[in-house]
Amino acid sequence: MRFVRTAVYGFVGTAAIVVGAVLGGPSFETHLPGAWFFGMPGGLFGSLGADDTLPPLASLALVFGGLILLTRVWLGLLRHLSHHPGVPVKRIVLVVIVWALPLLLSPPLFSRDVYTYAAQGEMMSHHINPYSYGPNVLGATPFNTLADSFWSGAESPYGPTFLGVDGAVDQASGHVFLVDMMLLRLLEVAGIALMVAATPTLARWAKRDPAHAVLLGAGSPLVLLALLGGAHNDALMLGLLMAGLAVARRFGTVPGVVLCALAAGVKSPAALGVLFLGWVWAGEGASVRRRIGHTVGAGLIGFATLESVALITGTGWGWVRTTATADAAFTGVTPINVLARGVSIVSHVLQVPTSTLTIRPVFMVLGVLVAMGLGIRFLLRAPQEGLVRNLGLTLLCLALLGPVVWAWYVTWGVVVLGAVAAGRLRSAVIVISTFWAFAGVTSLHGVYMRLLHTFVLPDLLLVAMLLAVAITPLGQFGTTRPRLPRLPRLSPPQDGNGVLAGVGATTS
C-alpha cells in the first residue's frame, strides 16, 4: 500500500509538470504549430498554451510544485530503501514507470534538441551526410522549421551509431514528423531500460542494494525530466555504456568494450568507458606497461567497432571534427560561465573592466585542464577504487567543468555513480541530481523576468504555494514502531483451592 501511495504521489507530480509546461508555452517547450499532438497553436487543446514568452503564475506553480512533490517522493523512497534493503527491483521499476507515464505523452520538454534529431534522421534517410550539411538543406518542412535556429545550419555533433539509428527511425515513421517524434522518444525509453537492466549487476558487484541503485540513478527526477521528458539521445548513450560495463563484468572485457564503443558512437564522452575498461583489463597488481598494452588493445577494438558503424552508415568520421559544436552555446548556470561572470563583475568594481566574453575562453581552457587532470587521477586509481566509481566521477567532472553544461550532461555521471555510490558520495549524487533537475526545467532568466514584471502579491502567493507543497506531510513512509514478538500468555499462580495466590478470598 505504501508503494502504491508513492507511485500515485509521483504520478501527480509529473502530471502537474506536464500540465504546467503546456500552460507555460515557450518557457518550457517549443510551442510552435505542429510540434506535438496537443497544447500547441492550431492543435488539439491549443488554447491551453501561452503565447507570452514569460511563464504565467499558474504554470510556474504547477511545474515547480510538481517537481518539488516528485523530488520529495523520490527522496522518501530512497530513505525507505536505505533502511529496508532487499526490496525487489521490479517493484521499484513499476513505481518509476507510473511516475514516467505523463512524460511519455507530453510534448518534448525543456529543450528542442529532439527536433534536430528528427531533422538529421530525415537527412540520413535521404542520403544527406549531417557532417557536411545542416538541417536547413531540407527546406521549409517541419523537420527543419521546428529545429532550433541555432542548429539549423550546424553540422551534427553526434556519432555514427546515433545517426544510423536516427535514419532508421525516420524511415520506420514513413517520414511522418509526429510519428518520428514518438519513435525517437521510445528510443530514449529503450536507453533508460538498458540502464535499469545493467544497474543491478554493477550494484551487486559493488555490494550495494540493486533497488536503491536503480532509483538513485535511472529513477531520479533528473533522468526522468532531462532524458525522458526532453527525449535526449544521452539516454541511448548511457544505456549502451551501462550495458557495456555490466557485460564486461559478466561475460568479459571484449564485448563490454564493443558496447562502450557503440555508446561513444552516440556521443563521444562514452569513449571513456573504453579507456577505463582497457586500463583495468590486466587485473589487479598488473604493471603499468601491461595496463598500457591492454588499454591500446581496447582502443583498437573500439576503433574497429566505430569504423564498422561508420562504413555501414556511410557517414565517415566527420563527427570527430564537429563534436565540439555545442560548446558555442551559453548557459547562466554553467560553472565556468558563472566564474567568468563573477571575475568580470569584480574587474568592473576594481576599475579594470573586462567583459565576460573576453575572459570566458581562459576559464574554458582551465576547466578542461582541471577535468583532464582529475580524469587521469581517477583512471590510475580505478583498479583500487573501482572502475564504475571512478568512471562516474570522471564523467561528472567532464560535464560540470565543460565549456557548457546542460542538465542532461550531468546525467552522465549521476547514472553511472548511482550504481555504486554510498556514504558521502551518495549524498553528493542526490544533491547534484536535485539541483540540476530544478535548474534544467526552464530558463532562470525567464523566471526572473516573470517575477520582476509582476506585483509583489502574486510572487508571494507563488512562494507560499510552493512552500506548502514542500512542507505538507505526505505520509508516504510513516515511521512505525517495530512490532515486538508477542509472549505466550501465562496463567497466574493459584493455591490448592483454586484461589489466586497473594489475593485474599472474600466472603459474602
Image (cartoon, helix red, strand yellow):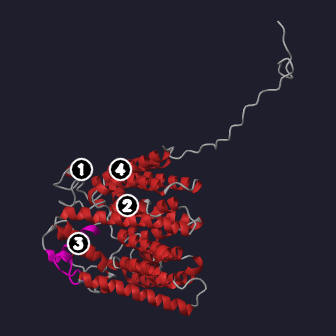
Q: Quadrant of residue 307?
A: bottom left
* Between discs 4 and 1, the one toward the N terminus: 4
Mark 2 to mark 3: distance in Å? 25 Å
Q: Which residue is mark 2?
A: 225
Residue 184 % position (x, y): 27, 66
Question: Quarter holding the C terminus?
Answer: top right
Residue 484 % position (x, y): 67, 41
Marks counted in the figure total 4
Q: Which residue is mark 1?
A: 48
> Is mark 2 in CB contact (under 8 Å) with mark 3?
no
Mark 3 to mark 4: distance in Å? 34 Å
The dot on residue 16 is 4
Q: Is residue 442 visible?
A: no
Residue 127 among magenta residues: yes
Label 4 secondary element? helix
Foreground mark, 2 or 3, reads 3
Q: Is residue 458 above or below residue 418?
A: above
Mark 4 to mark 2: distance in Å? 13 Å
The residue carrying pointer 4 sits among few (fewer than 14), some (14 to 19) or many (20 or more) residues within 10 Å by Cα, namely many
Q: Which residue is mark 3?
A: 168
Residues in magenta? 113-138
* Residue extending farthest top: 508
* Between discs 2 and 3, the one toward the N terminus: 3
Residue 210 among magenta residues: no
